[in-house]
Amino acid sequence: MVDLIELVDRTYGSLTGPQGHASFVQALATVFRSHVIARQLDGPGHEHAVLAHYDDQGRPMNEMATVASSHTYVNPWFESPMVSRLLSDGVAGDEGCVDPGALRRTEFYADILRPFDVFHSFGLVLEQGTTTSVISVSRSHRIGYYSSQELELAKKLLPHLRNVCAIQKALAETSVSDSVIGQRATWALDVKGGICGRNKLAYFAVNANAAALIEHNGGLVPSQGHDRASFSTAVSEVLAGARLHRRVPLRDKAGTPRFIAHIHHCQSPAFLNWLLTDPATALVTLQPLDYDVSELEPMLKELYGLTAAECRVAAKFLELESLRLVAAELYRSEETVRCQLKSIFCKTGVNSQGRLIKLLCTLTTR
């Protein structure tokens, strides 16, 4: 029987970018012996709007997409009396929803399905709203009909597909670009801080020799004890919605910052209220730093003319992100540090603590 664990792994791996997506499509095609994977929308009046077609190698089928987009087709699956079953379960065979004879009399079949040897399909409904988003998996006459066993397997996969769909929407809500997610280890946390999703880079990150984060008791914690309290506080604030974004420097044993953990709040409208797995409430991305902390202060002095004292404040602020904590760390009054920050703002051209941190991160990352 098919290895569902591997397929689920590739489902979450599709979050890493184009290669991950191609790998997922290939796995889906292999598992269900399919030659066409389509992503489509069902709109008002059951108008068929194709998003993309892929072959069994994960390559876009541009010719099929062109044909499907040539003019408006009525999607016969969603006209069927069995549409309620398709929407509730998310999986159904064509012949379970549409009479084979009626299907073969439609333009939809004549212009799209038959020329590309689509004989039997089932749909995986990812979201339902003003438009319904569907992944359809199809195969040719040579392979025959999908079996009940295969459809049961698809039902087991469906919750993971819906979760990935929700995570992708959450990424859009947090304004984190796909290119960033594709380059960084990323974990999705549920409302209690438990891990409910991860991309492929996250697997490598937690198993690296110098891992900055480790998975422990179903959650995510820094490997070094001195960062755990600040990381836990930041995660709690983001999960509660008190902060939409927190940055937490993660240090090595010597206390030198080597990574920044970005914790993003996922807006609840990004998720489907009928999602079958725990929806993500926060995303954690791991940003590697490529600098020696001793090099940051000379860089700030050279580029912006900061004094030695201001350089120390700026470096500490990148690490701690708190005026109060910086003052305590440097044994200065909060008022003194506040005045130095105002001077740093003026010299660097930023106008907020968040923009200063963003500038410092830009200077210190590859």
Image (tube, helix red, strand yellow):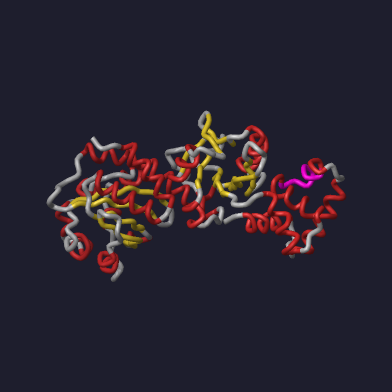
Quarter of the figure with residue 173: bottom right
Which quadrant would the C terminus be assigned to in this image? bottom right
* Mark count: 0
Return the residue found at the far top.
217
Q: Is residue 79 visible?
A: no
**Where in the figure is residue 184, as x and y percent of width and height?**
51, 50
Q: Is residue 361 above or below residue 252?
A: below
Relative placement, left or right, of 245 versus 270 is right
Residue placed most toward the observer, 294 or 244 = 294
Please tell me whether residue 340 belongs to the stretch shown in magenta: no
- Above or below for 365 versus 324: below
Which quadrant does the N terminus fall into?
Answer: top left
Q: Which residues are magenta?
A: 321-327
Res 59 seen here: yes
Does the magenta portion include 326? Answer: yes
- For the residue pair 100 and 223, the one nearer the viewer reads as 223
- Give the overall secondary structure of the magenta segment: helix
* Image-based side of 343 in relation to 243, left or right: right
In percent of width and height, residue 66 lies at 28, 68
Q: Is residue 309 left or right of residue 265?
A: right
**In the depicted view, which residue is nearer to us: 316 or 228?**
316
Q: Is residue 109 left or right of residue 133?
A: left
Q: Residue at x 19, y 56 (%)?
A: 118
Residue at the farthest left position: 142
Residue 258 appears at what percent x and percent y? Answer: 61, 45
Residue 321 x/y as whole percent: 71, 47
